[in-house]
Amino acid sequence: MDQRLATYILMAQHTTTVLAVVSMLFCFSLMWKGIKLTKEGQKQTALSAARQRLMEVERINSLITERFEQEDIPEEPLLRARHYINVPPRSFCDDRDFVVVVHSRLNDLETRSNWRRTYGSFQAMYRFALVFVVGRASTIEEKASLGSEVNIHEDILEVDFNDTYRNLTLKNIAALRYVLVACPEVPTVLKMDDDVAWNMEKAAKLANFTAATNKIHCSLHTNIPASRDTKQKWHVTYEEWSENVFPPYCYGLAYTIPRQGIIRVLQALQTQKFLWIDDIFVTGVLARHSAVSHVNVDEQYDYYPMQSVPIWKNSYTFALIQKCNIEYFFLIANSHLFIHKMTAAEDTLKSERI
């Protein structure tokens, strides 16, 4: 009897062990399936996002073709509508008062990252949309790097031309065309270089004022002679520019242009010869031939902020800086935000002590 009982107990122990092993294997199976399902879900999400981006690129290119490709610019093939390779999502400028278009070098991820950490964090607060315009990624490394950036940030406008200094006019025109078709409800564009510090509150007011007055607002240059000295960075040949003086144009570090102004300067492309200096071409040549006027707000610009920080931070909207100082000058230009937060924090501490 005792031997039979011992046998039953041993069998029960073996059965329990087997059941435990089976249960463990079943749990592992469920976990593996869960991991596979999670990975599959992530893969499907990534594929869905990629499809949406592709659909938006196709939509934008279709709108660009419909609106601009029929324009008669036979003598200037450079000014014809360009193909867009990557564009922001369809909703990126929804419920925004202005679009900040930043001219960026293709491989300058560091500067774009600094912009995103600073100005990019306040887009909703000041009702603007931020987009970086670059030329075509050509190498495998460039495509991989930019592709990763597009997937994460969705704020890149990549256009089909070489990303060179001499193609800044193409970059400018492509950005204006894009905003015109992609953001029909946005009344103003703030064009910026990436080595600029700016006060977001004042820039928002300037953008709104630009929309109301329907004029380009900028630091205006007048009676500037065309340089023929080949040692000068912005020299032009007589073939490129036959006049001795440039028309009034905006200093390109930052300017605001209203939607109607964009429409008119783009229409002027049909009759004008290409000029590679984008600020002179867009805000000078095209503005003159389309009768788009300027408002000179030079008092809002600081070209030497390192020597005049106390004056600039209280009085200026834009400042030319070194790109390595973006975060530093962001804090100075928008110190009112942080002073307000510090004051609020101090008030909270005082109330808690009481």
Image: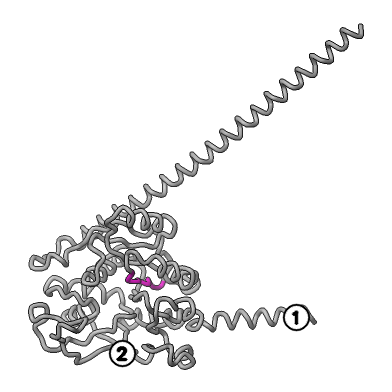
Name the residue beneath numbered marker 2: 296
Majority secondary structure in the magenta region: strand
Q: Residue at x 41, y 73 (%)?
A: 97
Q: Disc 1 residue type?
A: Ser
Residue 121 visible: yes
Instruction: Give the distance between the C-alpha atoms of the residues marked 2 and 1, in whole angstroms.
Output: 47 Å
Label 2's element? strand
Eyeballing the image, is 142 above or below 283?
A: above
Image coordinates for residue 91, horizontal then vertical, percent: 41, 60
Position of the N terminus by quadrant: top right
66 within the magenta span: no
Please tell me in which quadrant of the rendered image residue 243 appears.
bottom left
Between 151 and 18, the residue placed more toward the observer is: 18
Position of the C terminus by quadrant: bottom right
Name the residue beneath numbered marker 1: 351
Eyeballing the image, is 298 above or below 174?
A: below
Image coordinates for residue 350, horizontal then vertical, percent: 74, 82
Residue extending furthest right? 2
* In this rendering, position of residue 226 left or right of residue 159: left
Q: Residue at x 14, y 64 (%)?
A: 71
Q: Disc 2 residue type?
A: Asn
Between 217 and 328, the residue placed more toward the observer is: 328
Eyeballing the image, is 139 above or below 186?
A: above
The tag earlier along the polypeptide, 2 or 1, is: 2
The stretch of residues the image draws in magenta is 97-104
Between 228 and 45, the residue placed more toward the observer is: 228
| Res. 223 mark | none
Q: Residues within 10 Å of mark 1 (few under 14, many from 20)?
A: few
